Image (cartoon, rainbow, N blue to C red):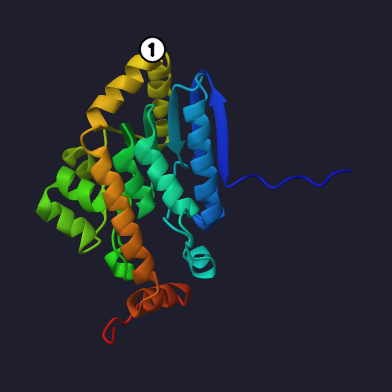
Amino acid sequence: MTEAQAPSDILVHTEAGVMTLTLNRLDKKNSITGAMYGQMADALQAADDDHAVRAVVIQGHATIFSAGNDIGDFLNAPPAGTEPPAFRFLRGIARFPKPLVAAVCGPAVGIGTTMLFHCDLVYAGDNAAFSMPFVNLGLCPEAASSILVPQMFGHHRASEALLLGEPFMAEAAAEVGLVNRILPPTECNDFAQSQARKLAAKPISALVETKRLMKMAQLPDLLERMDEEGRSFGRMMREPAAREAFTAFMEKRRPDFSKV
């Protein structure tokens, strides 16, 4: 008798031209580990290579999309080398040539929000809560969000989101254009799937070329900014402010930045 295999933290399912990536780590609030970034990066590459896949959906659960990076994983295995899984995933979503759809319910923290700026369609549950609290962790933005957030939100709203790290709800996200439509949480994933199936029924050459033309002017700048953010992020992770923030998080106390 063989031992049952534990379910994956990223579920990958392909049907009718749509590949679906489901964050499946509910016991840890769908926080993302390096291994999960690697799985998602590999899945996006497979979707790019497979002509039968015409659209990709990224989704979580009706109660939570993602709590962001797994802090314990970051502390135990900080990103290293020239191509860590997190950066491979970020470059993958920025470069992904086919339509990318997201369904977001509940908290979407850090990368849970910044990845959405690279999606083509975003549908949110009315319980969605977006936040980018990088400064509060002694860090800087990632995923080229230092370009994309001010561009979409305007400088003052971007400052609230990135400097104060204050959360914003689905209505505010829709107002600035981050979200296409707000739905009841129990309907959000299904609606995103129905939109992806509409895309999958269209000619893939036209989808890819239209997306390429929309993104071609900015993509080099986004990739360059990702590299710059990555260098800063890696350096700041080793500095006292981030160490205090991470330690406080693990000890379940408020950080004290008065001496850093």
Amino acid type indicated by mark 1: Pro
Q: In the depicted view, which residue is nearer to us: 209 or 52?
A: 209
Q: In the depicted view, which residue is nearer to us: 134 or 252?
A: 134
Image point (50%, 32%), residue name: 20
Q: Return the x and y of residue 50 as percentages of the image width and height.
A: 52, 24
Secondary structure at badge 1 equals loop
Where is residue 76, by image quadrant? bottom right
Q: Return the x and y of residue 182 as percentages of the image width and height.
A: 29, 34
Label 1 environment density (alpha carbons within 10 Å; few <14, some 14–19, many ≥20):
few
Q: Is residue 23 visible?
A: no
Q: Return the x and y of residue 259 as percentages of the image width and height.
A: 28, 87
Which residue is disc 1 drawn over? 203
Where is residue 1, by image quadrant? top right
In this view, which residue lies farthest toward the bottom?
259
Image point (26%, 41%), residue name: 220
Q: Return the x and y of residue 240 as percentages of the image width and height.
A: 35, 80
Answer left or right for 32 relative to 152. Answer: right
Q: Which image quarter holds the C terminus?
A: bottom left
Image point (49%, 22%), residue name: 53
Q: In the depicted view, which residue is nearer to us: 160 or 232?
A: 232
